[in-house]
Amino acid sequence: MAELEPDTPFEAYVAERGENPRRGVRTMRLSDLPAGEALIRVAWSSVNYKDGLAVRPDGRVARIDPIIPGIDLAGTVVSADVDGLAPGAAVLAHGYEIGVARHGGYAEYARVPSEQVVPLPAGLGAREAMAIGTAGFTAALAIARLEDLGLSAGAGPVLVTGATGGVGRIAIDILAARGYEVWAATGKAAASSDLQTLGATGVLSRDEITAPGKALESQRWAAAIDSVGGPALPYILRSLRYGGAVAACGNAGGASLETTVFPFILRAARLIGIDSVDVPIADRRALWARLSDDLRPQHLELGLQSIGLDELDPALEAIHAGEARGRWIVRVGGEDAR
Ligand SMILES: NC(=O)c1ccc[n+]([C@@H]2O[C@H](COP(=O)([O-])OP(=O)(O)OC[C@H]3O[C@@H](n4cnc5c(N)ncnc54)[C@H](OP(=O)(O)O)[C@@H]3O)[C@@H](O)[C@H]2O)c1
């Protein structure tokens, strides 16, 4: 593949958050991209809650201005100044500073440090990888951590909150495929049948998990994956079974945590933190290999919408407003990639 000139132009979705906030598709040049060994032609990206924050002046996520957002990207290596990354190799990258403190995936080209690149596992295409994206990676990470702590199918019901969101729906999908009895908590009553198609045994309303309650309630959940936080996490803690564990992934419903110590000292509850951003690269590559194998979601096409860079605005608004019902993947470099 021929070396590209620094002034090579490409299309990118750019957000400016300063005095005159504006966003939209514009032409950038390779010389606008940050330093890094791997230049990637991006085929697909995705829309995550964090992207919805990164474009907003009040979002407190982006650390450069202007920014090409997009915390996920997948495509092919154009050039890489290191061994082991050949031009043409199918790769993905996400986490670390991508789409936050360095330009991300909403552009035809991205440049990232080689130690942040994940070769696409065999059997996983770029489009499918972005249908999983950071949201699905986070769901898989939570499930892997819970299983490391001893959770197994048959242990009892597992609750997933924020069920219609990216993390929630893929968590339900993977858990159900692994034989768990999964319950979904959602604020969208109309989504029940979709959630059951994904594999949920039953559906709770958001009100049931956010109402105030006693310090301890009847023991219901063997485990939980919580992407909502706020009042949902205290509910989970006080209704976990003895020795149960909750993986705290997000704060879509609030960042403060008000609980008592009773779930911990009387029921041996375990609260584990999930962070997808700074996962060491060897662990990240290993988990992606499992996402194409035993942790592979079975219903990625359900509720999946494919959009172009020029259709990002409404998707970013909707995900920020908590109105996501499926996942958006972003077709950046055309349909030709695997
Ligand atoms: N720890 C990590 O590394 C990591 C990685 C990815 C994401 N996250 C975080 O995880 C959370 C979910 O991410 P996502 O990509 O799944 O986002 P998402 O697609 O926007 O889904 C969030 C879901 O949370 C629920 N929700 C939204 N607003 C709410 C509110 N005010 N109160 C209660 N529930 C609300 C909604 O589901 P229902 O209507 O079905 O309840 C919504 O679909 C976010 O906080 C995100 O920042 C963390």
Image: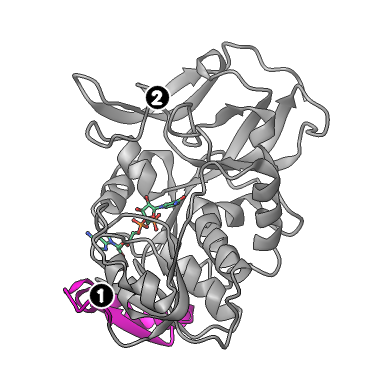
Which of pointers 1 and 2 indicates the residue nearer the eye? 1
Residue beneath disc 2: 26
Q: Mark 2: which amino acid?
A: Arg
Badge 1 local density, few (<14 within 10 Å), some, or many (20+)? Answer: some
Farthest residue toward the front? 265
**How far apart are the two marked residues, 1 and 2, measured between alpha carbons?**
44 Å
Q: Nearer the viewer, residue 32 or 336?
A: 32
User: Which residue corresponds to the image point at 37% horizontal and 55% vertical from the top-left?
Assistant: 250
Region rendered in magenta = 189-216
Kind of residue at badge 1? Ile
> What secondary structure is marked by label 2?
strand
Which residue appears at 56% of the width and 59% of the height?
Answer: 141
Which residue, given by chain and number where applicable, does mark 1 sit on? 209
Give the vertical position of 30 relative to 319 (above or below): above
Residue 304 in sight from this viewpoint = no
x and y, in percent, of residue 267 in the image: 40, 78
Q: Is mark 2 within 8 Å of ligand 1?
A: no
Relative image position of residue 4 (x, y in whole percent)? 67, 17
Task: Please name whichever residue, 237 or 314, is drawn nearer the observer in this view of the structure.
Answer: 237
The residue that appears at 41% across and 49% down in the rendered structure is: 48
Ligand 1 found in image quarter: bottom left
Q: Quadrant of the N terminus?
A: top right
Which residue is more in the foreground, 80 or 235?
235
Quick one: label 2, few (<14), some, or many (20+) residues within 10 Å?
Answer: few
- Residue at the location (32% across, 46% down)? 316
Per the image, label 1 sits on a secondary structure element best described as helix
